[in-house]
């Protein structure tokens, strides 16, 4: 009887052999041959697709100043998409696919935190009580552009402070009955160092962008009837100055807008030219980027 080698098997059987293996076990095998590389890339791509469509789970963000650890609530995040993630197309033998694995590793999933709870599906924000068809707060109107009240926080720096810090914790949770977590997996935890100069630059960018942008659709939400602008989905670059990365590995980051809040203060009589004044900024969570990559699947 002729000997049977691994390469003598059809792709369907090879996929059946490789599929049960963990991602961390598959990655070293990509260097065996071009055929094995293509099959493993297909498996990993399908896993990323499945992870992006995991409607039963939600991302939970906790980001707070150390002094507000016991008072700042966690925020549920709605999934906004993964740039570059499309359905798998059959690989053309004449096309080089060496860089496909690197492209998959550099994919980021985008989320937006909200102050309101999520529905049972885990992807939509619960409507406010009293929402009726035809009203401004009914789902399906402009409200769905940003799905929930925007998360905002206030950061203050004294005259001698060059920066402040925020503790960021990201978790993947599964919401069961009675809004209880039936599964809780930590994604990443770190400390964001928010510099005074960074707040000043971002605030200037936001002010310039608001002046240059045309008047868009707005809606008044919240108890104080706060005016909220229409959210426009944009692809964020890794070099976006508005993004603060949780760790140097840049596995996850938070995109923030900032606006300086002016208060009436008694101006000091004498002040040095290089001395700073106390400042207060309102930061707005414009979104969260998470490395929806092979690093996440391997854990």
Image (tube, rainbow, N blue to C red):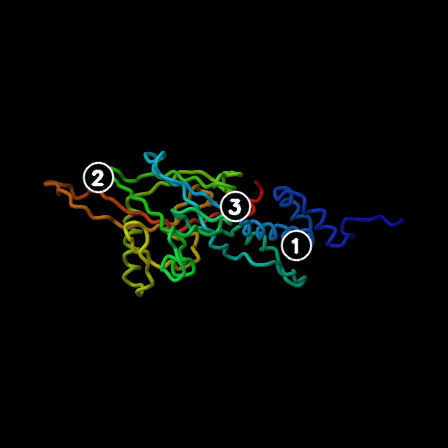
In this rendering, would 95 be left or right of 136? right
Find disc 3 in the rendering and name its residue: 57
Indicate the secondary structure of the residue bearing disc 3.
strand
Find disc 1 in the rendering and name its residue: 38
Task: Name the N-terminal-most of marks 3 and 2.
Answer: 3
Task: Name the N-terminal-most of marks 3 and 1.
Answer: 1
> Measuring 41% from the left and 51% from the top, which residue is drawn there?
287
The circle drawn on residue 18 is: none
Q: How far apart are marks 2 and 1 (CA)?
A: 57 Å
Q: How far apart are marks 3 and 1 (CA)?
A: 29 Å
> Measuring 61% from the left and 52% from the top, which residue is drawn there?
46
Q: In which quarter of the image is residue 11?
A: bottom right
Q: Residue 179, how many percent across, how many down?
A: 47, 41
Would you say the residues marked 3 and 1 are in contact, meaning their CB atoms lie under 8 Å apart?
A: no
In this rendering, would 253 be left or right of 16? left
Q: Is residue 143 above or below residue 157?
A: below
Indicate the secondary structure of the residue bearing disc 1.
helix
Task: Point out the residue furthest to the right here.
Answer: 1
Q: Residue 77, how many percent across, how many down?
A: 44, 48
Would you say the residues marked 3 and 2 are in contact, meaning their CB atoms lie under 8 Å apart?
A: no
Tell me the mark number nearer the camera, choosing from 3 and 1: 3
Q: In front here: 142 or 9?
A: 142
Dot 2, crowdedness within 10 Å: few (<14), some or many (≥20)?
few
Tell me the mark number nearer the camera, choosing from 3 and 2: 3
- Quadrant containing the C terminus is top right
Q: Residue 73, how many percent across, how many down?
A: 38, 40
Q: How far apart are marks 3 and 2 (CA)?
A: 43 Å
> Measuring 46% from the left and 54% from the top, which residue is drawn there?
80
Find disc 2 in the rendering and name its residue: 159
Q: In front here: 242 or 234?
A: 234
């Amino acid at each position: 009887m002729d000997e049977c080698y691994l390469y003598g098997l059809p792709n369907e059987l090879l996929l059946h052999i490789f599929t049960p293996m963990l991602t961390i076990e598959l990655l070293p095998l990509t260097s065996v041959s071009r055929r094995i590389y293509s099959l493993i890339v297909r498996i990993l791509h399908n896993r990323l697709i499945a992870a992006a469509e995991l409607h039963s789970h939600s991302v939970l963000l906790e980001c707070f100043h150390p002094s507000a650890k016991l008072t700042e609530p966690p925020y549920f995040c709605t999934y906004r998409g993964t740039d570059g993630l499309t359905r798998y197309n059959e690989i053309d033998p004449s096309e080089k696919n060496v860089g496909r694995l690197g492209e998959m590793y550099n994919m980021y999933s985008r989320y937006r935190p909200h102050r309101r709870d999520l529905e049972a599906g885990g992807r939509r924000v619960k409507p406010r009580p009293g929402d009726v068809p035809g009203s401004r707060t009914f789902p399906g109107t402009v409200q769905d552009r940003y799905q929930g009240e925007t998360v905002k926080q206030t950061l203050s720096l004294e005259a001698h402070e060059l920066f402040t810090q925020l503790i960021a914790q990201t978790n993947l949770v599964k919401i069961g009955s009675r809004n209880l977590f039936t599964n809780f997996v930590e994604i990443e935890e770190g400390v964001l160092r928010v510099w005074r100069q960074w707040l000043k630059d971002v605030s200037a960018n936001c002010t310039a962008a608001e002046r240059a942008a045309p008047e868009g659709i707005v809606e008044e939400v919240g108890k104080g009837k706060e005016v909220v602008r229409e959210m426009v989905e944009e692809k964020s670059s890794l070099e976006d100055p508005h993004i603060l990365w949780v760790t140097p590995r840049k596995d996850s980051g938070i995109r923030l807008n900032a606006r300086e809040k002016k208060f009436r203060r008694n101006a000091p009589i004498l002040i040095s030219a290089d001395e700073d004044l106390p400042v207060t900024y309102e930061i707005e969570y414009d979104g969260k980027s998470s490395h929806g990559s092979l690093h996440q699947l391997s854990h």
